[in-house]
Image: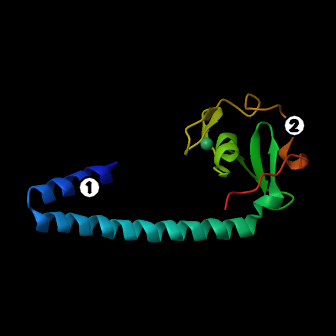
């Protein structure tokens, strides 16, 4: 949203004939854009690296209304937000909130494992027949 205010400000400066000040603000926006682009690229590489290590296409499963990920036979990670996974294909780790969970991305609240979407299907460690969803590329 801040970018829209900056663009409006630049437009107003150009209209008022303050070209040098407008160019200065424009350079500032471009500099921020380049930094943001670099950071986004770095985050994409981090995600790619994690996906190669964790192999979600092979280790993701659905149980108790949530998505879970195993990194080996003993360790289970999760729960992950079912809404984010079902709508965007994003694996977002839920945060503990009281007795339930909160998604830090979509802000969905889940009161507990038992009250989550879908019927409980048993212990995550033993429920590997759940459907596997491919990540978005
Ligand atoms: Zn979510």
Residue 83: image quadrant is: top right
Left or right: 5 in relation to 39: left
Name the residue beneath numbered marker 1: 7
Image vertical order of residue 51 relative to residue 6, above or below: below
Task: Give the structural element (helix, strand or loop) at label 1.
Answer: helix
- Image quadrant of ligand 1? top right
**Between residues 99 and 88, which one lies in front from this camera angle?**
88
The answer, for residue 76, to whether it is visible in the render is no
Name the residue beneath numbered marker 2: 121
- In which quadrant of the rendered image does the C terminus lie? bottom right
Left or right: 38 in relation to 56: left
Task: Give the structural element (helix, strand or loop) at label 2.
Answer: loop
Left or right: 26 in relation to 129: left
Gap in angstroms between the C-alphas marked 1 and 2: 52 Å
**Between residues 22 and 92, which one lies in front from this camera angle?**
22
Whether the residue under disc 2 has CB within 8 Å of ligand 1: no
Q: Give the residue drawn at x 80%, y 37%.
A: 64
């Amino acid at each position: 949203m801040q970018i829209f205010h900056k663009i409006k400000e630049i437009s107003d400066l150009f209209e008022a004939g303050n070209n040098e000040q407008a160019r200065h603000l424009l350079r500032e926006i471009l500099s921020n854009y380049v930094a943001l682009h670099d950071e986004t690229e770095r985050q994409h590489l981090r995600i790619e690296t994690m996906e190669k290590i964790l192999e979600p296409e092979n280790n993701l499963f659905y149980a108790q209304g949530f998505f879970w990920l195993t990194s080996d036979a003993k360790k289970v990670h999760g729960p992950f937000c079912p809404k984010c996974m079902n709508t965007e294909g994003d694996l977002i780790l839920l945060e503990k909130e009281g007795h339930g969970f909160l998604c830090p991305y979509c802000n969905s609240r889940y009161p507990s494992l038992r009250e989550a979407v879908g019927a409980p299907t048993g212990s995550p460690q033993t429920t590997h027949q759940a459907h596997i969803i491919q990540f978005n590329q």
